[in-house]
Amino acid sequence: MPEEQIPVSSLTQSTPRDATQPCCWVWVAVATPAHSSVSEPLSYVSPSALAPGTLVRVPLGRREVLGVVWEGPEGDAAPGLPQGVKARSIAGVLEGVAPLDARWRRLVAFTARYYQRALGEVALAALPPQLRDLTPEQMARRLKRKAGQSAKNAARQTDAAAAAPLKLTPQQREATDRIDADKGPFLLYGATGSGKTEVYLHAVQHALARDPHAQALVMVPEINLTPQLEQRFRARFAPLYGEDAVVSMHSGMTPAQRLKSWLAAHTGAARIVLGTRMAVFASLPHLALIVVDEEHDASYKQQEGARYSARDLAIWRGREHDAKVILGSATPSLESWHASRPPSKDDPQGGRYQRLDMPSRVGAAELPRVRIVDMGQQPRGAVFSPPLLQAITERVERGEQCLVLLNRRGFAPVLHCKECGWKSDCPHCSAHQVFHKIDRTLRCHHCGFTQRVPHACPSCGNVDIAPIGRGTEQLEEQLATLLRNVITPERRAARVARIDADTTKAKGALEEQLALVHSGEIDVLVGTQMIAKGHDFRRITLVAAVQPDGALFSSDFRAPERLFALLMQAAGRAGRDASYIAAQGDNAPEMWLQTWHPEHTLYAALRRHDFPRFAADQLQERVDAGLPPFAYQALVRADARTQEAAQAFLHDVSDAARAAQLPGLEHVFLFPPVPMAVQRVANVERAQMLIESTHRGALQHFLAAWQSVLHAARSDHKAVIRWLVDVDPQAI
């Protein structure tokens, strides 16, 4: 076994130490290779005892890396070293950074154990990247500069006035009163525009007022929602607690910004932390409240490395810190909805969450009226049905704004030759390259491979190659053409803009485009799901979804749930300002759906804005099929150079688990391996195997025991590049 992979009992020391110098054994969590089979902390020697949670620099192989001092074995006995092996010493301590507390370490340990990852991998991934690279000397200089800046900030008085809390509606008051009085966790089920953010603000204000050291964590699913939320929190709390009291944490920040925010939270200087899923691991020693906005969003599930669910870890962390947890959504996940079920005759105990209902919008605003267009009755090949186009035209002519949703970027999903059947397939993936007309490129959205659009069919030379399907680029172009003669009340031509991942790559681009929408300079906004949730567009009165049917027949049982949530969230962007709607006369806000399946039960529930009915139907289907939340799942995925090698690995580890009669096996069902939906990405074949159980504990015991089998089988399957375990997967 290589030096850097020797576990707690026997780590080597390449630098001899003075035998007369007193020293202590310390155990350090470091980021070991994912498939090294080393998941325990490694043992080192130190001139003095170090408290658990201390950040240290340690040698690992030929490198020097950051580590976290961890609890050692019972009694902290010296590990027995193999013959001829010497102990290695820590290289330095990051002085000035207080040790990470026991509750943070328990959070990391639970995450590693539950999601089947190495302890050091989770611990180090939870720390800012720059912290992992700084030497003790560099860290000392950074802290010295930070102390000087903090002193200047403290001396500088702010004369800004705190934004006055809005007067709460009766349902908001009832929700805040219950949050103050009860322990939770809470599911805040509120209609779009019902004022959930104001409830969050009041809950944070009460938590900080009760304790002068209290901290609050507020999470959002996507980076683009962070700036507007930060603006509201700063307006409310910066005048009360200082500019440094509110910080953000997300991957869009620079390494220096992330380190600054992390240190502010770790020292307690930051009272409020706003962030995406990574913020759930922020070191918050005085955590009193956690808010998870749009808790249903799949973005809270990490899809690389340790595949944790930030929403679920927020619940666990709230219990560990004795902090209140608020999950908020207009379309809660079915897991959270089921967990917040009220007591009934058949279920006197009910769920473990408390459900808070806010069914009405703030003020006199009404939810948009849903209109369903049967595309089977419209002109052949129409992208926009005549009634929808007429409705958009009338809204723009009155000075109102419209939003058009299509969750597919690019101009068209594929280019096609009618002569020979050629399609723009990616040479490295089992997927099509998407046609982007603006720069005349074909791009694979899986591996990133890009090439110029050919002048003729590469297969037969036919110059008549045509796009199939539609993306946001095409919708933007067609709408600009269709509305070219439409004049707004300002006597100017209608303006169409697009917001998706392609138009927001540049730093600050998203903020600039959203500012144009808010200022009224954009009349029709075309975009993907990134504009369908969380944004408070005051002048949008019409939302249209032009091609939503694809998810109705997906092989993923969660697809209908995600589609309903997306459409409900998109509908919620219309008619949010009651006073603006009243000024428009009798023109109520609308949500238009163009579909080939107008009688589908999902659309029927959406027409009534009836999430409880939709959720009840879906939960009954899940009960009948034995699916989550009434069962527990994990996926094991194997990546290899060939599909046969990937499936052979999964077959062998499945057979080995049965042969060894691993703990929990009698309560676990192993499905046969199958290719993934996109089975080849970047020339790597991917296969997966589903593991299911009605007992969460049995599944966890089985997965833990299975780890050694998976590691052992890797050496017999040289063609396998990697394997991973995904507990509670969100996509199958």
Image (cartoon, rainbow, N blue to C red):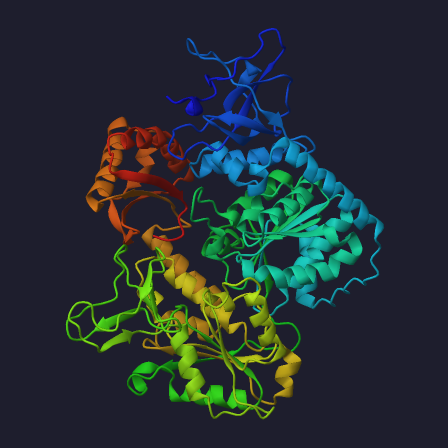
User: Can you give x and y, in whole percent of width and height, for residue 170 in the image?
Assistant: 69, 67
- Comparing 20 with 650, the one in front is 20
Query: Is 426 on the left or on the right of 573, as rendered?
Result: left
Query: Is 370 on the left or on the right of 377, as rendered?
Result: right
The quadrant the N terminus occupies is top left
- Comparing 21 with 724, the one in front is 21
- Comparing 101 with 621, the one in front is 101
User: Can you give x and y, in whole percent of width and height, for residue 679 in the image?
Assistant: 27, 52
Q: Residue furthest top?
A: 20
Residue 579 image-quadrant placement: bottom right
Residue 128 seen: no
Query: Is 235 on the left or on the right of 484, as rendered?
Result: right
User: Can you give x and y, in whole percent of width and height, for residue 530 in the image?
Assistant: 49, 65
Residue at horizontal 34 percent and vertical 32 percent from the top: 706
State how many labels appear: 0
Residue at horizontal 59 percent and vertical 70 percent from the top: 512
Q: Can you say whether 315 is above or below 4 in the image?
A: below
Residue 680 seen: yes
Q: Can you say whether 407 is above or below 728 in the image?
A: below
Residue 263 image-quadrant placement: top right
User: Can you give x and y, in whole percent of width and height, for residue 139 in the image?
Assistant: 65, 36
